[in-house]
Amino acid sequence: MDSSILIYTAVAISLVSVLVALIRFVKGPEKVDRIVAIDVISIIGITMILLLATLFKREIYIDVAIVYAILGFIGAIVISRFLKRGL
Amino acid sequence: MGNIFELIGGVFLVFGSISLLIAAIGLYRMPDFYNRIQIGTKASTFGVLLTIIGIAFLFPGWIPKLLAMLLFVLFTNPISSHVIARAAYFTKVPLSDKTKVDKLQEVSEGHLKKVKTKE
């Protein structure tokens, strides 16, 4: 009971940080700025999935977080290689 | 006894999300792309690490899966940051005005000269 308040606080702070990173995603002057912003947003999403796993007490949600981490990593690498030398 | 562990885990979770907030604020306020990628990757990796430690305090039965997750994030996050920064440098994203040392420029220019003389 005691720790659920702290978990809710952590979820709220992560939501605020998603919003702050979204400002850079909209504003960013270069394409690469947007890629970095989407990378940070996906990492914050991983953290929020982990926090949801602790809130609902389901272990299977960690697998979802692992798959999301793999997809974010592959996406960042593919987009940056595309920028560097084309498909 | 279990209550103390819950409290420690919750505090770790809050500090992890504060670190993510620091990453986002740095992403907003830094003057240059290279500073932005530096703080974005470092602080967000630290935030994920603190969150996973906190969950390991809350639920000790989940430690194997959390360890796999931690190793994956710890290895792949710097790699993706490195690839993005390299693509940015070679597509000529401008550096900040306060930059004084650019060692990669000398190295890459020398490399280009070598390639041209060979051809």
Image (cartoon, helix red, strand yellow):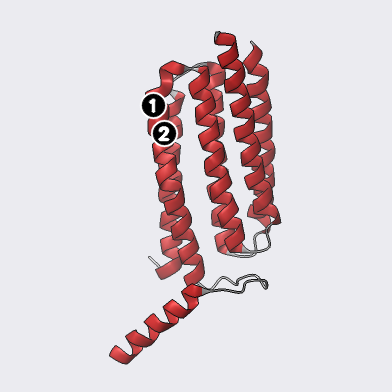
Q: Is residue B54 left or right of residue A71?
A: right
Disc on res. B69: 2
The number of numbered badges drawn on the structure is 2
User: Quick check: can you spot residue B62?
Assistant: yes
Relative to A57, say whether B83 is above or below.
Answer: below
Q: Which residue is mark 1?
A: B65
Along the line of sight, the residue nearer the viewer: A35 or B58? B58
At x 46%, y 33%, the residue is A65
Which quadrant of the rendered structure holds the N terminus of chain A?
A: top right
Q: Position of residue B25 (x, y in %)?
A: 69, 48
Q: Amino acid at mark 1?
A: Lys
- Residue at (40%, 49%) from the top-left corner? A74
Residue displayed at 59% across by 27% down: B12
Q: Residue at x 63, y 17 (%)?
A: A4
Residue B8 located left or right of residue A78: right
Secondary structure under the numbered disc 2 in the rendered image: helix
Give percent across and percent down for residue B95. Answer: 60, 71
Q: Is residue B67 left or right of residue A49?
A: left
How would you rate the neighbour count of disc 2 (Cα within 10 Å): few for under 14, some for 14-19, many for 20 or more? many
Q: Secondary structure at mark 1?
A: helix
Residue B37 image point, x, y percent: 56, 56
